[in-house]
Amino acid sequence: MKFLYKRQSLSFSRVLSVIIFFLLSQNNLLAGQFKNQFLTANFSEQVFSTPIPPTVNPAPPEVCTEKIEGLPFSASTATTTTVIQPATTYGFMFDIYKLDNSFTLTINGKPIANKEIEFQSAGTDGVNIRFADGSKYEGGVGTIYSLTGTPAAPLLRVVISPTGVVTMFGSKVSGGPLFPLELFNGANFNNVTWNKTMPNTTVISQKQVGPTNISGQGFGLNEIPCICFNPADTATPGQDTKVGITLFNRAGSENTDNWPMTRKSGHLALESNTKGFVVSRIAKADLGNITVPQEGMMVFDTTDKCLKIYSEGEWSCFSTPTCP
């Protein structure tokens, strides 16, 4: 699952949203061309990108998923809010953007913890959640109500695994990365039941201790067939590649090479006998400077000397050339 489990191996066919062909040739180097079915433009040194949404989110080996949008949720002044979230086959997540200062989340009649999850000490039974490194909100980290999150960088994340195991993650600063959280002081997570074929009833409530509020968004994952495991279609030719960059001055259907259309089933084709495809080069110690890395993002790690891909919360060396 994209967020729930640690990936064991990575492959280009899962994480790249474009297919890159780098072709070697003995032809003389000529003026470059950019060509697709709508546009022709000569160039010598140009960079362009075409955003193509991924159809499959990376997941553990032999499991591929797609994101399912859930519904927003909010509560204030100790009110109880019920939200019907969709069925998903591979777990669900509740991203919290704002919280003051505790909450209880009940899923299909079962609370996710045996106590209200409390982030504030004053006027309560005491804080019962902390980071795995021992730090706490109010204890080395700002108060929970002074921090905010966004859809790209939530303040808190509650994860329900496909088997109903509950885990939580939190940010130590507004808009920062997420770190594992754990319950203590007599509090423990419960296992819950997440419906895979029928809607899920979720209830959010809060104890009244001064101002209280919570808001966020839910989303889940559905398991889908892994594209890279489908047998290759060798009976019929693949679709033409519509976009390409060549330094051999042979782009277009009017050319006898019919390039890049002759390179089948690609989003993008590149060819040169003097140039390569270069991604960002970053030292391992500086990877944390990418504050909100996206699933499938690539860099070349100059410390570990490998192409790394960001997946499921970590940077990993890409070393498996095909699907595992």
Image: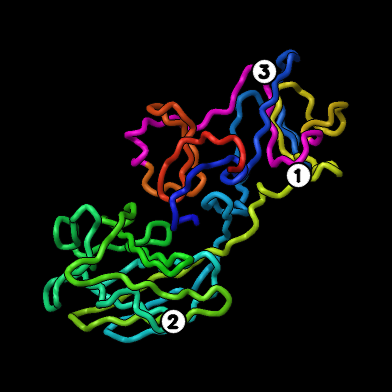
Q: Is residue 234 visible?
A: yes
Locate residue 168: give its quadrant. bottom left
Range of residues picked out in magenta = 261-289
Residue 197: give x, y in percent of width and height.
58, 76
Residue 176: give x, y in percent of width and height.
32, 53
On screen, residue 305 versus residue 264, left or right, reads left
Query: Dot 3 lies on which element?
Result: loop
Query: Dot 1 lies on which element?
Result: loop
152 versus 197 height, above or below: above
On screen, residue 80 versus residue 85, left or right, reads left
Give, as a three-letter code, the residue at label 2: Asn
Q: How is the image coloured?
A: rainbow
Locate residue 260: give its quadrant. top right
Circle on res. 108: 2
Give, as a three-letter code, the residue at label 3: Asn
Residue 148 versus residue 189: which sits nearer the camera? Answer: 189
Judging by the rendered image, the residue that carries numbered circle 3 is: 273
Judging by the rendered image, the residue that carries numbered circle 1 is: 232
How far apart are the alpha carbons under marks 2 and 1? 42 Å
Residue 264: give x, y in percent of width and height.
78, 38
Q: Are marks 2 and 3 in contact (CB under 8 Å)?
A: no
- Crowding at label 3, few (<14), some or many (≥20) Cα neighbours within 10 Å? some
The magenta stretch spans residue 280:
yes
Q: Residue at x 41, y 78 (%)?
A: 107
Residue 8: give x, y in percent of width and height.
48, 45
Give, as a three-letter code, the residue at label 1: Ala
Query: Dot 2 lies on which element?
Result: loop
Quadrant location of the C terminus in the rendered image: top right
Q: Residue at x 34, y 79 (%)?
A: 111
Which residue lies most toward the left here?
A: 122
